[in-house]
Every structure is written in C-alpha cells, then in structure tokens.
Image: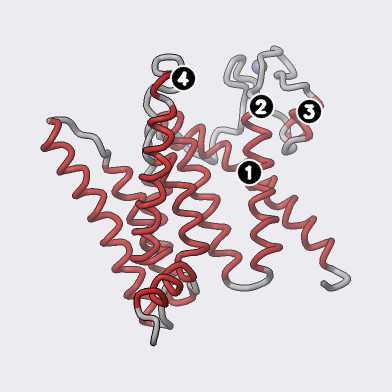
C-alpha cells in the first residue's frame, strides 16, 4: 500500500457515487425510451428542474430529508441507495483488483448489471442501450479482457463463442418453454443480455451464470410460494437473477473452470 492509496480509494468512491447518480437516470429513462442527457433531472411530481447543489449524490437526499425542495414529494430512498451501491461496488473492485486491466472491465460490467437488475425489476425490460451496447463492447474489449480464456485472438474467439452460446441458449430455452406452455416466457431482452454476458465472460461464464441464476431462482421461487399474492412482485424477472450471477461468474469462472478441470483430469 502506497502513500497515495487512501486518496485513490476515496477518489474511486466519489467517482462511483457520481456514476451512480447517472445510473439512476439510466434506470429511470432507458426503459421509457427517453434521452439520458436531455432534459436535466427534474422532480417527477412538480417537474421543477433539480439544481446542481440539490443533485449531489447521497448528501442531497440526506440534506433534503428525502423530499423534493419545492413540492415536498417523497424521493425514493432507492436513489441514494443505488448511488451508494455504485460507489461501494467500485471501491470493492478497486481494492480487490487494483490498478490492472481487470478493474475497468469488471467495473463496466458490474455497473451495467446493476442497471439491468433495476430496469428488469421495475419494467421487466432489459434495454438494448445496455445489452446490445454491451455485446459490442465485450467483443471490442475482448483482446484486452483477462476474464476470457487464452491470449489475443484466443480471447476474441472466446468472447464471440460466449456471446453466441449465451444468446443461443436463452433463445433455445425460450422457444422450448413457449412450445411447451404456449406462451412467450423469455423475452428477447434476456437473450441479448446473455449475449453480453458471454462477450465479457466467455462460454464457461455463460454456463456458470445460467446455472447459478436458475438455482437461486428456483430456491427463491419455492420460498415465495407461501407469500404468493402478497409479495412486492408476483413474478421476479429472470434478469434479476442473471445480473448478480453474471457478475459472480465474470469474477470467478476462470478459477472455477480450472478447479473443475483439475477434478476431471487429475493427472494433467
Ligand atoms: Zn417536486
């Protein structure tokens, strides 16, 4: 730890809080097809624009006691909570991964998953602006992405294979389920989201994500049966399970794959 380390961590935290404030705008506007740059943030009730000093992450919400300065409409605690989550995620990744190429890649991926979690929770929507952009970014960054298997072109192929496998599997599940039940269960949003996950985390990351999300989804689904009709949400969108599972898979799938191969092939 260097002399500068406490300062860089504080800087990363502040940066994360500011980014979190922007993520709030993305979560609010992307599912509605609105611009994320224009107009300026305003109170959803009285439409009054929010001044810069009322828009300081976390602090403004605390200073205003969670109410709009002009009409006193309650401002959800989710805004400062998402800002804080964004800051904490970046600090944890920074302390864990340090000044390496892993940090910006994991940070970009984690914050995208955070947005997808909340848009899916709120609207059962996974906006193309995140998922398709994510596929493109995953492929573009593949050469430098140490979470993909191999080096150089090997990583690019791994990214491409991951994107195809991720999107293909989800599309296949959706088609099979649709045939079985005569309904459309899996939206194209999940297909594109898993394309993004594969482009960043490769084919093994895709398998780990789907496995973990299905497992947790099944457990939560069973646990919620006695609460049916009284829960916040009757159906929990699959993207809400995929998002945290994908983050865990990105960070650990290479080590899990190595451990798994060591069990399968103990003498190699
Ligand atoms: Zn207001």
Tell me the quadrant of the picture where the C terminus can be found. bottom left
Cβ of mark 2 under 8 A from ligand 1: no
Which mark is drawn over residue 231? 4
Q: How far apart are the alpha carbons under marks 1 and 3?
A: 16 Å
Q: Are marks 3 and 4 in contact (CB under 8 Å)?
A: no
Which mark is drawn over residue 20? 1
Q: Count neighbours of disc 3 (C-alpha within 10 A) and say few if under 14, some if 14 to 19, many if 20 or more.
A: few
- Judge by depth and name the residue closer to the eye, 209 or 222: 222
Which type of secondary structure does the marked residue at label 1 adopt? Answer: helix
Mark 1 or mark 2: which is in front? Answer: 2
Q: Are marks 4 and 1 in contact (CB under 8 Å)?
A: no
Which type of secondary structure does the marked residue at label 3 adopt? Answer: helix
Mark 3 lies on residue: 62
Q: Where is residue 267 in the image (x, y as percent from the top left)?
A: 39, 86
- Judge by depth and name the residue closer to the eye, 19 or 101: 101
Q: Do the residues labelled 1 and 2 touch (CB within 8 Å)?
A: no
Relative to 140, 76 lies left or right: right
Mark 2 lies on residue: 77
Mark 3 or mark 4: which is in front? Answer: 4
């Amino acid at each position: 730890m260097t002399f500068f380390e406490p300062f860089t961590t504080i800087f990363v935290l502040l940066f994360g809080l500011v980014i979190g404030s922007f993520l709030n705008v993305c979560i609010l506007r992307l599912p509605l097809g609105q611009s994320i740059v224009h107009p300026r943030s305003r109170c959803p009730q009285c439409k009054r624009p929010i001044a810069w000093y009322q828009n300081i992450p976390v602090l403004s919400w605390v200073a205003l006691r969670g109410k709009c300065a002009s009409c006193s409409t309650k401002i959800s605690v989710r805004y400062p909570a998402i800002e804080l989550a964004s800051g904490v995620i970046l600090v944890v990744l920074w302390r864990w991964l340090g000044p390496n190429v892993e940090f910006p890649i994991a940070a970009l991926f984690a914050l995208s998953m955070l947005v997808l979690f909340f848009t899916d929770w709120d609207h059962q929507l996974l906006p193309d602006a995140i998922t398709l952009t994510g596929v493109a970014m995953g492929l573009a960054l593949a050469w430098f992405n140490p979470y993909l298997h191999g080096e150089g072109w090997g990583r690019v192929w791994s990214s491409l294979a991951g994107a195809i496998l991720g999107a293909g599997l989800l599309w296949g599940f959706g088609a099979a389920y649709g045939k079985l039940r005569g309904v459309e269960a899996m939206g194209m949003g999940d297909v594109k989201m898993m394309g993004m996950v594969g482009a960043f985390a490769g084919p093994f990351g895709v398998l780990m994500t789907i496995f973990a999300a299905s497992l947790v989804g099944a457990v939560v689904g069973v646990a919620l049966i006695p609460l049916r009709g009284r829960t916040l949400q009757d159906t929990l969108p699959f993207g809400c399970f995929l998002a945290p599972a994908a983050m865990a898979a990105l960070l650990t799938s290479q080590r899990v794959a190595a451990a798994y191969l060591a069990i399968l092939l103990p003498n190699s």
